[in-house]
């Protein structure tokens, strides 16, 4: 009987330890489950915040990307504008050079015109002076030739400008008592108009 009692006591003790262990395990499991639920809740919050942050970051990225596109376009436009302005400045410089050149040409022409006008005025006065002495007679254009080697002058009683040989032909339609004007002459049997005042002494020529 004692043996059975001790066995029962021992088994009861063993079962009590097992129950305590089971209770401890159940308690640990409950705690672990509670901790797990807390961790899950925190994880959800972190995931939500992460997703929200990621979404915000994506929005900021897209916004910044859009700004970069606009800035790039503005920079390209600015560069194009600078190149265009540079080309325009070069064209303006070229035009200024052309205008300056034209102004210089006009100044030279103006001086030449003044000189020509002065020469013509002096020439007219000179011709008027001698025309009073020798009356100019007009007649129908006629061909003449030189009787001998003769000098050609730039006006009546003027300065010698050429020397022509005997036999050379020319045309005229004006003369005085002592002089005849050369209005044209022949070169290789071809007539050409005299481009300047040319006079020869009447006694040196004969009609053809």
Image (cartoon, rainbow, N blue to C red):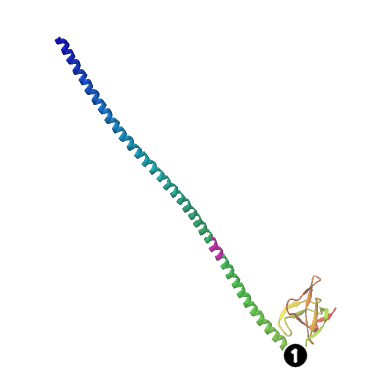
**Magenta range:** 87-92
Q: Is residue 88 magenta?
A: yes
The residue that disc 1 covers is 133
Side of 25 relative to 3 (left or right): right
Quadrant holding the C terminus? bottom right
Task: Say few, some or many: other residues with alpha carbon within 10 Å of mark 1 (under 14 / 14 to 19 / 20 or more).
Answer: few
Q: Residue at x 61, y 72 (%)?
A: 105
Count of numbered circles on the image: 1
Q: Residue at x 74, y 88 (%)?
A: 131
Side of 46 relative to 150 (left or right): left
Q: Residue furthest bottom?
A: 133
Q: Is residue 156 above or below residue 18?
A: below
**Residue 202 percent coordinates (x, y):** 80, 84
Residue sitting nearer the eye, 208 or 18: 18
**Residue 179 percent coordinates (x, y):** 78, 84
**Residue 117 percent coordinates (x, y):** 66, 81
Determine which quarter of the picture holds residue 121. bottom right
Q: Residue at x 44, y 49 (%)?
A: 63
Q: Is residue 25 magenta?
A: no
Residue sitting nearer the eye, 51 or 84: 51
Q: Residue furthest right?
A: 208
Residue sitting nearer the eye, 14 or 50: 14
Which type of secondary structure does the marked residue at label 1 adopt? helix
């Amino acid at each position: 009987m004692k043996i059975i009692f001790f066995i029962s006591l021992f088994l009861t003790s063993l079962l009590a330890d097992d129950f305590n262990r089971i209770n401890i395990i159940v308690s640990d499991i409950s705690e672990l489950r509670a901790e797990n639920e807390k961790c899950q809740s925190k994880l959800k919050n972190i995931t939500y915040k992460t997703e929200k942050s990621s979404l915000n970051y994506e929005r900021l990225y897209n916004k910044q990307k859009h700004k970069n596109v606009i800035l790039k376009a503005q920079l390209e436009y600015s560069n194009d504008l600078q190149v265009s302005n540079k080309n325009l400045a070069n064209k303006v410089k070229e035009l200024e050079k052309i205008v300056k050149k034209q102004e210089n040409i006009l100044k030279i022409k103006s001086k030449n015109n003044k000189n020509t006008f002065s020469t013509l005025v002096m020439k007219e006065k000179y011709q008027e002076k001698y025309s009073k002495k020798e009356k100019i007679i007009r007649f129908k254009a006629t061909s003449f030739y030189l009787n001998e080697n003769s000098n050609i002058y730039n006006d009546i009683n003027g300065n010698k400008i050429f020397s022509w040989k005997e036999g050379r032909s020319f045309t005229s339609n004006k003369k005085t008592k002592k002089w005849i004007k050369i209005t044209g002459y022949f070169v290789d049997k071809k007539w050409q108009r005299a481009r300047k005042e040319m006079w020869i002494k009447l006694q040196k020529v004969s009609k053809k």
